[in-house]
Amino acid sequence: MVGVVGGGQLARMMQQAAIGLGVELRVLAQRSDDPAAQVTPGTVIGDHHDFEALKAFAAQVDVLTFDHEHVPTDFLHELEAAGVAVRPGPDALVYAQDKGLMRQRLSALGLPCPEWRLVASDDDLADFGTTVGFPYVLKATRGGYDGRGVWVVGDLAEAKAVWAEAVERGVTLLAEVKVPFVRELSAQVARSPHGQAAAYPVVESLQIDGICREVYVPAPGLSEAAALDAQRIALTVAKELGVTGMLAVEMFETADGSILINELAMRPHNSGHWSMDGAVTGQFEQHLRAVLDLPLGLVKPVAPVVVMANVLGLDLPEVYPAYKHVMAHDPGVKVHMYGKAVKPGRKIGHVNVLGLPGRPFEDTVERARHAAAYLRGEIDE
């Protein structure tokens, strides 16, 4: 039995894969109406910050894995010491939890990162500004996602204001150069405990206001050499950090074609949702295979182009009535909804569209955008 800490949409989609594999999956969710709790029998309601609740949940399963990276590392070390198979383990997961530790380790491995510095004082803010110039980026080392916990500061006064608030809240900050990237890429790999690894095609993600809106597979126009370099980087990270399960390495591509590591996620990732319909083995099945130490599946795409578009809540109180139009307009669209209440800007689902042979890339993008926009209530025709 696989136990998943967290009851969000990632755990929900793991349950779909578990059914196909004939694997029993159990979820530790905080609420009975969490996305995964709605579809997973035997869901346990509890807080991952409560060690006794976490320990009791872990005692019921054979392998413990995650829907998110927010479980305290000390708890996971205690579980490992008690014989629980934690995958990925705390010694790997900490690098997805703490951006400062991540930068230190990746830099020590000689992997390409933006210029960075941990902030310990006002002097660090000024020195970093002198070194790289303004604007630059300040990030909370822990807890930020989807653009939260990230500030672009235009001058020293703005940097000091962010720093003062962080000190008041007990938040550690990391300063990074504002990379003049031309696009964002993601390289996903899977790795099993015995060291088998598989690399998915490198994808491009379109981010708006810090939230992923679309993913293009493979990354359009990316040279074979650059794609292989991105995959090599991701495989190196997985091996050197001892990752088990899925790993997403989010990257910046700069104007000169160089690649810099942005962030890590040690779980299925939004940039891999395309694989549910677009690859021989989707990321959720692959994650379960990896944490169970089963042979990994083939990652080859099943279409020349795949586009994923997130459905963000807007005006429609219910999405289901929009299905008739979306499915009739384009029977090739695959709709995946997360069982979430609709709120503006909230990720409530995604659509996958497989490109047709001989059709231009833009045609597939337009099909995905139309479906996502209609489900969002952005268009009505």
Image (tube, rainbow, N blue to C red):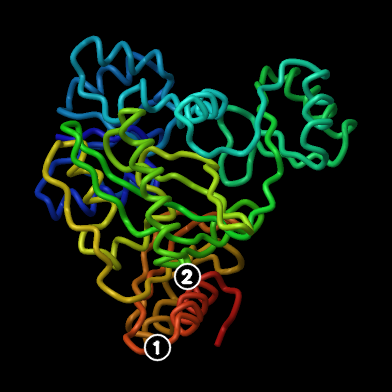
Q: Is residue 186 above or below residue 43?
A: below
**Horizontal relation, residue 213 to residue 40: left or right:** right
Under tag 2, what secondary structure?
loop
Q: In this view, does 73 lie above or below 347?
A: above
Residue 165 lies in what quarter of the image?
Answer: top right
Q: Is residue 272 above or below residue 84?
A: below
The reply to whether residue 14 is visible in this rendering is yes
Q: Determine which of the numbered discs, if any, sits on residue 220 in the image.
A: 2
Residue type at mark 2: give it.
Answer: Pro
**Horizontal relation, residue 54 to residue 154: left or right:** left
Considering depth in this image, is 378 or 322 the residue closer to the camera?
378
Residue 192 lies in what quarter of the image?
Answer: top left
- The residue positioned 44% from the left and 86% from the top of the image is 360
- Give how far across and how far down residue 374 sits, in percent: 52, 77
The N terminus appears in which quarter of the rendering? top left
- The residue positioned 58% from the left and 54% from the top of the image is 211
Tag 1 residue: 359
Considering depth in this image, is 208 or 35 the residue closer to the camera?
208
- Give how far across and how far down residue 322 sits, in percent: 46, 77
- The residue positioned 28% from the left and 36% from the top of the image is 27
- Give how far across and how far down residue 140 sits, in percent: 64, 30
Decide which of tag 1 and tag 2 comes sooner along the chain. 2
Under tag 1, what secondary structure?
loop
- The residue positioned 27% from the left and 39% from the top of the image is 245
The C terminus appears in which quarter of the rendering? bottom right
**Mark 1 Cα shell of 10 Å, populated few (<14), some (14-19), many (≥20):** few
Residue type at mark 1: give it.
Answer: Arg
Q: Depth-wise, is mark 1 or mark 2 nearer the camera?
A: 2
The reply to whether residue 33 is visible in this rendering is no
